[in-house]
Amino acid sequence: MQPKDYYKILGIDQNATQNAIKSAYRKLARKFHPDISKERNAEERFKELGEAYEVLKDPGKRAAYDRFGNPWQSTQDFHRPPAWKNNFGFSKSGGERGFKSAIGEFFESLSGWSRRWSTGKIGKQWFGGKDHHARVQIDLIDSYRGANRRITLRIPIPDSQSSVPFTERVLDVRIPKGIKAGQRIRLAGQGLSGIRGGLSGDLYLEVEFKPHPFFTVEGPDVFLDLPVAPWEAALGASVKIPTPEGSVEVKIPAGSHQGNRIRLKDKGIPGSPSGHFYVTVQIVLPPADSEKAKKIYRYMARDFSFDPRAGFGNLK
């Protein structure tokens, strides 16, 4: 690992105070955080910033870093002080190549990084807090109109030794118009807290719709089972029905059968394109719970030449 100019990486001079180092790191870490930055080299820059800050924020590590020359220069120009051999056991047997490798190993141990840095698996897992995922239930009407909602979440506390390993957090959440079940709302910086001054992770809220007594939802489409009397299905009728946006009037076509669907175009969840609202005909029979009702059913049985099982053919 080639030594780097940690002061240059953070954009500060060698006489910078600890507060200046911390301020510079936080400002640049926000700018190059891989989840929010649009810079092409954001992940690599974020890694370098974390590496530099880990060394310079610690007075002991910073003093050691400053003591052993200017490590950002070529190792060919790096003059090894006598203390290197005495304190770290470096020998001349490995030649210049071995000495360069020893320098790299020293600064790798000085900064405290694991081998994850060299494999490229770097990101907020090391300095930043982890992302947190949770589910949140919203009303269907919130998806139609958009809404602001206040929610309370239990957020786990990393490495907590407490008998209550979580904390409650109250958040004001903007629910965007047109959001669907299964989609996520991202709240930047509202996840688990970072370590060593790192940025917090993000909070992802997966949306679910609260159960509704009338409506079901599939993707952007909304469905309603509509109870219909036999004469309404047979003769046709105009009836009022509920929708998430209020009541509307629909026409039941004459001769409708059980399960027939009526589509209200673009009346589902808003979007590009919008979903549709489907009305499914459910024929409901009047109960034969009085002598008069029974008499009417007998008339129907006598006067209608109707066989609901005609499609079975002649059964034997």
Image (cartoon, helix red, strand yellow):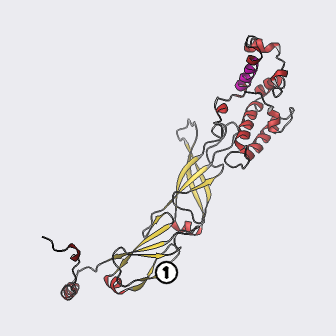
Q: Relative to residue 300, is residue 175 drawn left or right? A: right
- Residue at 69% across, 40% down: 198
**Magenta-colored segment: predominant secondary structure:** helix
**Rendered location of residue 81, percent (x, y):** 83, 15
Residue type, mark 1 in image: Val
**Rendered location of residue 65, percent (x, y):** 79, 25
- Residue at 33% across, 75% down: 258
Residue 112 position (above or below residue 137)? above
Residue range of the region highlighted in magenta in the rendering: 99-109
Q: Which residue is mark 1?
A: 248
**Rendered location of residue 235, percent (x, y):** 35, 87
Q: Quadrant of the C terminus?
A: bottom left
**Rendered location of residue 226, percent (x, y):** 39, 76
Q: Relative to residue 121, is residue 287 drawn left or right? A: left
Crowding near pointer 1: few (<14 within 10 Å), some, many (20+)?
few
Residue 224 position (above or below residue 95)? below
Picture mark count? 1
Residue 258 position (above or below residue 39)? below
